Image (cartoon, rainbow, N blue to C red):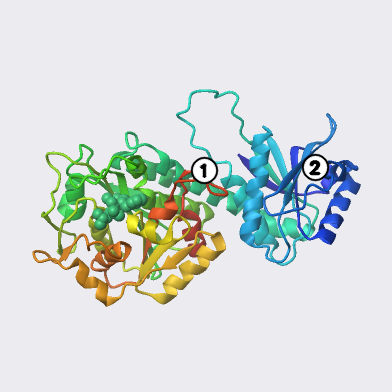
Amino acid sequence: MKVSLQRLPINRVTTDLLCVFVHQDPPLFRKEISALTKTLGAKISAAMNGDFRGKDGETAMAYIHKGARIQRICVVGLGEKRGLTIEKYRRAGATAAKKARSVKAKHAALFLPTLGAKAADVIYAVTEGAILSQYTFDKYITKNKESRSTLEEILIATNSGAIAEAGTGAVAQAHIVCEATALARDLANAPGIELYPETLAEAALESAKRSGYTATVKDEREILELGMGGVIGVSQGSRRPPRFIIMEYGKPSNRTVVLVGKGVTFDTGGISIKPAAGMAEMKMDMCGAAAVIGTFEAVARLRFPIHLVGLIPAVENMPGGNSIRPGDILRHYNGMTSEVDNTDAEGRLILADALAYAERFKPAAVIDLATLTGACVVALGHHATGMMGNDDRLMDALTAAGEKTYERVWPLPLFDEYEKLIKSDVADVKNVGGRWAGAITAGWFLKKFIGDYKWVHLDIAGTAILEEAGPYAPRGGSGVGVRLLTEFLRRWK
Ligand code: BES
Ligand code: MN
Ligand code: ZN
């Protein structure tokens, strides 16, 4: 999809669908509509007929005669001016672009007149909403291929010189970050028959080559030699061998950030097998890995002046004659042992190795992302990522990036009292903590394996896997983490 910004008066726009945004406040609304009507001919007010109020999410279509520069106009409501947020603009951008697709427009222009101080942020958000809303995962649907319509071009148009100036960079950057989010969604939605540790590693290698960073891949023998007993253990029930992916962007510095992503390409639960209902979702148990790959793609293409390392332990968790069993004890990269009480708590077993390995890079911060626990979905649903860690400033920075991108995070405590829930009689730690506080005991397990660095754990089990479509994402993989981390790293000094 082509996305660009142009400065031109509204009556000079040529497009299949012109989208304009109006407020709900009656005087403002009247002013906005009458200005439009004046420049475009008295078409809109007639079509509106008082039915349309400019409510948040509301739209009205008006049609211009054939052969006109503009074929149709879509008026998109923003809701009341008081209480208008950046997220509302993001959703309005999505509403406009979805409307464009539904009328099979190939070209849509989103017109933004004057905006005030937050112009660049508004343009960034509108562009994001518009692009993200067009994502579909339909490559395996063979029916009606021809009649399916895709929007080929989005033009952000403005008559304001100031906005054009502020917005050009914003549109280009938003476009890159949204493409990186779409990559993460594609990886998430890919079925397990196609996406397994080796092909996930290939995807990272391809992204690295395309975008300007490096990726190296450790195979099973090398993982064994490194002593990553968690990765080896979880993967050994599968015919698909594990991979350990190491990514690097930028020049080594004393402000290195390490991103760690859970890469379970399919999670059956192993011998502690999951129930059949809903198990298909577990093809998305590599969303942490997808977020890391997507973030690398964005950061490299945007040429951020930072040093970034990515670590992805990639495995398939299957039951089989060679699977690990409840009661088994694994030895991790740092020499610590864990008792496997439940083979379905596999994510923490592979992350333990990766988090211990992260110490090698002397990082200033380590952030891991994982679809780690159903308990986190019970606690926060699909609207907030669970956040735990050992450094308040790092967590504050992620909270701020979450507010900005609307990929919001919410803290859960790692109080000392929770530690004893994962005490083992036979090993250094047990991989499950019983019925209560499941997201926290998982976080505590990880905490046992971190090195001497500042660390944040993000449990994205609810936010990465959408059971229902969101305002700018279909159901399935949301690509969560890419926009959050890119925003966090944009601010990283
Ligand atoms: N991948 C799952 C967690 C999950 C559940 C992610 C639902 C997304 C949606 C994880 O490996 C898992 O199975 N966790 C178990 C842990 C339990 C055995 C302690 C869980 O949450 O039930
Ligand atoms: Mn599991
Ligand atoms: Zn899992």
Eyeballing the image, is 200 above or below 334? above
Residue that badge 2 annotates:
13
Quadrant containing the N terminus in the rendered view: top right
Q: Are marks 2 and 1 in contact (CB under 8 Å)?
A: no
- Badge 2 element: loop
Residue at the location (56% across, 63% down)? 404
Residue 369 sits in quarter:
bottom left
Q: Front-most of 218 and 197?
A: 197
Left or right, 27 with reference to 484: right
Does label 1 point to a residue whose CB lies under 8 Å from ligand 1?
no
The amino acid sitting under disc 1 is: Pro
Residue at the location (43% across, 57% down)? 381
The amino acid sitting under disc 2 is: Val
Residue at the location (57% across, 48% down)? 472
Left or right, 32 with reference to 323: right
Which one is earlier in the sequence, the residue at label 2 or at label 1?
2
Residue that badge 1 annotates:
474
Mark 1 packing: few (<14 Cα in 10 Å), some, or many (20+)? some
As drawn, the residue found furthest toward the left would be: 426
- The image shows residue 242 at horizontal and vertical percentages of 24, 45
Residue 15 sits in quarter:
top right
Mark yes or no: residue 274 visible.
Answer: yes
Mark yes or no: residue 170 visible.
Answer: no
- The image shows residue 309 at horizontal and vertical percentages of 37, 59
